[in-house]
Amino acid sequence: MSQARPASTSIGDRVFSGLCQSSGMFVLAVAAALVAVMTLQAWPALKQFGELRILTSDNWDPDRGAYGALLFVYGTLATSAIAMLVAVPLGVGAAAYLSEIASPRIRTISSFLLELLAAIPSVIFGFWAVEFLAKRGLAPTYDLLGLTHQSGEGIVAAGLVLAVMILPYITALSFDVCQAVPRSQREGSLSLGATRWQTIWNVVLPYARPGIIAACVLALGRAIGETMAVTMVIGNAQHLDLSLTATGDSIPSIIAKQLHETTPGDPKRSVLIALGLVLLTITLFINVLARGMLMWWASKPRAHKGKPIHVTETTDLPPRDPRDAEAARRRAGRRDRLMTRVLAGCQFLTVVPLFLILGYITYKGAGQVTAAFFTNLPNDKPPGLYHALVGSVTLVGLAAAFAIPIGLTSAILLSEYRNNRWVTPVRFVAELLGGVPSIVIGVFGYAILVYPFWLAPGERGWGYSAWAGGFALAVMMLPVLIRSSEEAMRLVPNSLREASYALGASRWQTVMRVVIPAALPAIITGVLLAVGRIAGETAPLILTARGSQFVARSLSDATPSLPYYVYDFAKRPDEALKNLAWAGAFILVVVVLLLNVGVRLLAGKRVVAAARAD
């Protein structure tokens, strides 16, 4: 559909266009600055990469000048491999069940539950994995097998919790590509006598294979960059152990734990940031590869997609003996019923972790929530997390105040100025920015707002602050805001724009008085999604806002947050502080889930309103 245009361009239009274009260029500048700052900070280590044996040695002892990070590379790859081995068959099986077998009601409920699972903050996954998955699941299993272990923690536990975290992504994306298989392909297969399972295996999955592979590649990028859940359950060992129950460490984890201990000019700092640059390069490559595969799959002519339907591929050829034919049909029927149960089991297993996590967090945390939790500080009697609640609201508010105007005006550029030369690079970079690991964004904020990279060794940095934390969270919000706001404005009927122009309105007047009001409910939904995305973030705040035992006096002071204190107190032996962590985890889950349920309800109301309008 061609986009309507005003007859003339006023000064106001040029100013408005320049504002939108400036926002888009700011997004490009942020992405370029992130890569440039990371490269500059890592340069001392990159120059000696081979000499320091960063990727070839497992001897990590910075105090003695040893920077072998093979242990962290192994931990990252091993946990990601375990996650993919578990999540890919379950996710693809669940997607096939939802697409081809499940009733509309089951499909709706399952999709909603998967959305909730995807919305759970990573620090909650980590807390649950330490206390439930490791201690009450893997530890008894290891004891039964006679294996030595560290309370069930280690590479396997980290891999399993990563599998749970990426399951919603694999399932949702694979479901979308399975749904894109033309109905004629299924009907042709069934008309040749194929069972439902034979149709899934020989028609649907081959047709959707490139999209499914791309979904798995995107999920792999998510697993490789995960920080908090892995940090809390991997065991944080400083030696390489290849045994089944081994503890270990990962690249995001070591950065989160040790970067804040370094100073400008410290070789350890440049090595850690070099590892972050390696992580960024890998995740960006994976995201570009996956998006390229999806674009290639979507652009292929439908007539040539999938696997050609031949009777020899969809069903057994009828034997000459009628008794053999009947036996073949019975075998096919039994196989179909078996695989239907297997696929249903895959779907069941994808949503079970949601109930385990919510149930255990509620069981341990709901009873710890008292009035003192909302009014007292950690050192009070009884202790509370009032300062963390205030800090979280402050950080999210700062991030929203920074990201919403830039995200919205960038989305206007993408939606309303589609012929602008900056549209394609802004959209591409915004999508890639959404795949950058949160710990890398934290390193970026740390290097420009906490201990700026231009300071000489020994100079005092600006320190942790709400400004730094809010900036890091805002960078994470931008991709969500830009994508959701652009889609919202694209859904506004072009006839409304044409009517506005026919009445003599300029482009900026049409956008501000027609397009934005019409798209406002969907834009608000996108804002809530973005807020839900950052409300439970911990990794970037460890390196930017950090925390304190008191309410921050100003935005320039270290600012506590609820996710940070869930992470911090979860590791403490003090039972009172651990109970505070459980209470904080429960509150955090409730807030994030309420945001996502609100988004779902708003989206549902828009669908109903649109149906009534039609």
Image (cartoon, grey):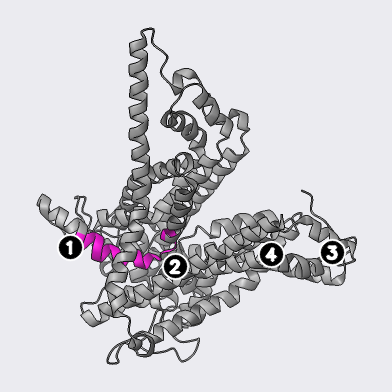
Residue designated by label 3:
500
Q: Position of residue 398 (x, y in %)?
A: 54, 79
* Residue type at tag 3: Ser
* Residue at 57% across, 38% down: 297
Taking depth in this image into account, of 164 and 454 the one nearest to the observer is 164
How far apart are labels 2 and 3 at the CA level? 39 Å
Q: CA distance from mark 1 to mark 2?
A: 30 Å
Furthest toward the left, the residue is: 146
Asked if residue 126 lies in the magenta stretch, the reply is yes
Say whether residue 421 is visible. yes
* Magenta stretch contains residue 203: no
Q: Which residue is mark 1?
A: 151
Choose top left, top right, bottom left or bottom right for residue 278: bottom left
**Element on which disc 1 rests:** loop
Precedes in sequence: disc 2 or disc 3: 3
Magenta stretch prevailing secondary structure: helix
Q: Are marks 1 and 2 in contact (CB under 8 Å)?
A: no
